[in-house]
Structure formats: C-alpha cells, structure tokens
Amino acid sequence: MGIKAALPRYEIYFYNTVLCLAMFWAASWIFEVSSSNANRKTFKGSVKPGWYYFGRKMDTADFEWMMWFSTFREHILFAFSGHVLFAKICSMLAPQYRSLVFMVYGLLAVWTSMGWTYVTLILSHCILLYSISLVKIRWLCFVTGLCTLATFKCEPFVSWQAGFVQGDFELRHVLFYGGCGFTIMRCMSFALENCQRKDGNYNILELLKYNFYLPFFYFGPIMTFDKFYIQANKCNLTRKEREMWNISLQGLIHLGVIIVVDILFHFMYILTIPTDMKLLKQLSDWALVGLAYYNLVYDWVKAAVMFGVINTIARLDHLDPPKPPKCITMLYVFAETHFDRGINDWLCKYVYDYLGGKHDNVVEELVATLCTFGVTIIWLGPCEVVLLWAFFNCFGLNFELWTAKLFSMEPFSSFEAAMSEAMSRRIRAIFNTFNFWSIVLYNVLALNSFDFTKLLTKRLLLKGFPITTIIVMFVTYCLVQAIKERERRQALIDDPDPLPPSPPPNAATSPPTAAPAPTAAPTPTPAAPQPVADPSKEKAE
C-alpha cells in the first residue's frame, strides 16, 4: 500500500468527528475531577494559587516548566538576550569571528552562573576526549565517552564532581547535570567526527566553540559537530526570503502556547492527579485513558516549546538546529518515537544507522537497537523504570521489522495485492491501533510511574473489557486514520503525482472525414508519437 492511498471524504469526516468528540469527552472528565479535588490534602504541594483573574488554583507539579516560564524566567531571558545582542553586533561587524564570540559569551555565562571550578571540570572532560580523539580509534572514543558519561550516573563519582559547583541555589542540580551530560555527548560527537576526518585533526578551539554555545549548553538540543562546524564558521550570512518573518512568527507561536498551557493548568491538573493512586482508583475509565493521553501530549508540548525557544535563538544566529520532536498524536510506529530529536539524530548517526545499515536484516537490526538503547540507558541513568522502558521500546522496534518481514511473504503479500488500496489502508490502521497504545503505555511508564501504568493497563485490557477496550481502540483507529490522511496530503504536496499524458494535437483538431469507398485500399497512417515520460517525475510507492 502506498502512502497516497485515499479514503472517501465522508469516511474521513466521520473519523475526525468521532475523534473530536472523544477528546472533549475525556477532557470534561479530567476537568470535573480537577475541580472537585482542588483542595485535596495530597494536592497541597503542587496545586497552588494561580492567576488572580481566574480565581482558581494552578497545577505546578512540573519543575522544568515552572523553572523556564515562571521561577527563573527573568534570569533565562536576561542570559539569552545578552547572547542575541552580542551575536548580532558581531555578525554585523566581524562575521568571521562570530563563533569565537559565541564561545566567549557562553564561557563567561557558565562561569558566572556555576563558578570557575565547574568550568574547570567541564574543560577537563573536553581535554580528555579531545586527547583520545587524536588517536582516531572509533571504539576507543566511544568507550571513553560512555565511561565518562557513566561517572555522572553512579556514586561516588557523582558526589565528587558535584562538589565542584559553587553556591546553593535552586537550579544548581539541574544546571550541573544538564551541562555535564550534554558536554559529554557533544565531545563524543566531536571525537567521532575527528576520527572520520582524513587529513589532520580539528583544533581544540573548535571543540570549545562547539561546546560553549550558550543556547545549547545546559538544555540542548544536541547538534552534531559536523553540522555546527560548517554553519558556525560560515562568513556569508544571508537569509532566505521571509526568513525573519518566519522566525518572528515562530516566537509568537511559542509565546501563545506558553500562555495557553498555563491557562489549562488552572482547569486540568493532569500532572498532579497521577501522583495520587487513591484518587486514580476512583476515576472512570475515560478519565484514566484521557489522563494518560494528555500527559504524553503535554510532555511533547513542553519539549517542543523549550527546544523551540532555543531553536529560535539559534536560527537568529544563522544556524539550522534540530527540528522539534514529533507529536505523540502523530505517532503510530516505534521507528519515529522520540521526544528529543537532537538525541535521536545523534543516536541514529553514530549508533543505530552505523550498525543497522539499511535496517532490513533482522540480526543487524537487533544488534543496532540493543546498542542504541544501551547508550540511551546510560544517558538517562540506569534504574528500574528506564530499564523497563528501554526493553519494551527495543522489543517494539524489532517486532515492527519482524512483522513487516512476515507480511511481505506469501500468502500475505498476495492477499494485500488482491485488495484495494483503501481496504489495505484500513487493515493496516487496525494493526497500527494496537501499536499506538503500546507506545502510549511504554512512555507513560517513563513519564509517570509503574503503578499508574499498571492501573491503566488493567482498566484498558482486563477490568474494562470488552466495552472500554473496544471503544478506546475504535477511537484510536479513528486517530490513526486521521494521521494517515495528514501524511497522504503532505506526500501529495511534497511529491505531486505526474499529470496524465495529453492527447496528440491532431486528434482533437482534425475534421471528420468520410468513409472510404469499398473498392479503395486503405492507406496506412503513421502512429502518433507517444509522449516520453520524464523519469524525474516518476515515484515508486
């Protein structure tokens, strides 16, 4: 089945209607639970007085969101504003030195916020991995980088390195782990790119420019060294048509999303409710399912906004940063599941694609996924929840390949070839429905708790069977079809189908002629030349 397989328009309208009604229905349940339990004793730590205009309490359970857009908003805005100002001045006066200005400003900002001992710790890791990269042995760079990263995940190394940070402010813990973790990943990218360089080595100054770029330093996303090196050292700084307008529009959209999310936090306590297991057991099946779904949607929104703000600054610096993560609403296959596209690009470039090749061999794919999730476990920090999340996602990724291999064999391939494209799309959507909920459950496990995931699974598959199970799966089927329709329209925009060949000109303009006499021998007429198809317009489904 091709991605351009279409369904009747009335069927798509029906799917969208069912989907919208289900979303509003689940949201109404969550709103009712939030309103009736606002003064609950277990909510006092995270549900606090909100905006005066609403007269309602606000969900403040997410420390990252409150840090960015409430508690330390002025500090982050001040640091980024200074970066944009100095970067703009340098781009106008001496664009060839702008990467050096990025490094100096970032180094001073880190020094001011965390102290000179923390800067010394970061520089020591940079020097260590730079020295290893000079040997140009790929596996040695990998082992050294992963061992260095592991020192921030286990004792006594964590406590010893944390002692290098001066001060006792609230953001100390977040900035320490964020700066150190992303530094190691950037240094590994530099080392691996240096191993691939044929002539000579990159200068250590290039590594420092790459690592101390302030917008990416503490919170990411990770931009691989090869891309950053080319873009940061480009002297011809020109913009595409309407690029500044698009950057400004993107910034306004992020501001609007921040305001909308803060407003919704006054009416839906989607982050605080999952922490109260006693309350969760009293909720209806619809409220529980909607709570899990909206938790994942919010986590995507948070990642998209935080990375979007940073990416807007990077685009002002004439960089092309990693794109925002793909929304959970648009996911129904494990191969596209990620909440941080920078880490995803890093893992694909240096581990997954490097070991997996074309991803059509079962054994190579298994090795590639095991190594990829092994690195991810070290990055996130090994614990029970992370290990379970990695195991299930690794299994799901491989199971997709095994299923694709199985259904490409006989007699399944003949069955699909005999049916219409629309019917093939419907049958595939049924399988994608179960895949979608596997992705939801595995990621709810990572974002919330094992107890919440266990309760949700029981309600969905055991206690709520068959009514809740069938209804939820049907609504999810409608969602998958809506996603497929969006992908189909995007495919038609990106690669429109070639126009059918036009008829020969003389076929339409020549007047009708009388029938020849029976005795006259018919004269052969030359065949009209067939139009030659343009190979560039042909597309394999």
Image: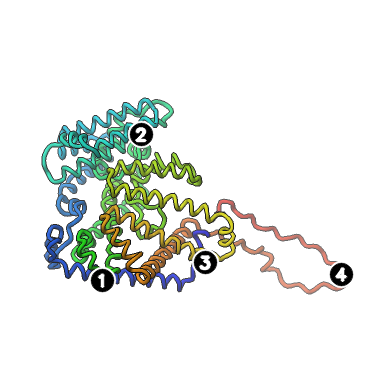
Query: What residue would you read off at disc 4?
Result: 520
Disc number placed over residue 423 in the picture, else none: 3
Q: Earlier in the sequence, mark 4 or mark 2?
A: 2
Q: Is residue 266 above or below residue 156?
A: below
Which callout, 2 or 3, points at the residue further toward the start of the chain?
A: 2
Task: Name the element at disc 1.
Answer: helix
Q: CA distance from mark 3 to mark 4?
A: 55 Å
Left or right: where does residue 303 sit relative to residue 169?
right
Q: Are marks 1 and 3 in contact (CB under 8 Å)?
A: no
Asked whether, in this view, residue 320 is left or right of residue 491, the answer is: left
Is there a contact, CB below 8 Å, between mark 1 and mark 2? no
Residue labelled with disc 2: 142
| Residue 398 appears left or right of 315 | right
Element under disc 4? loop
Visible in this render: residue 158?
A: yes
Between discs 3 and 4, the one toward the N terminus: 3
Which of the 4 image quarters holds residue 33? Answer: bottom left
Query: 72 or 63, which lies in front?
Result: 63
Categorize mark 2 by other alpha carbons within 10 Å: few (<14), some (14-19), many (20+). many
First-in-chain label (1 vs 2): 1
Q: Which mark is residue 28?
A: 1
User: From this viewpoint, which residue is outermost toward the right?
Assistant: 519
Name the kind of residue labelled 1 in the image.
Answer: Ser
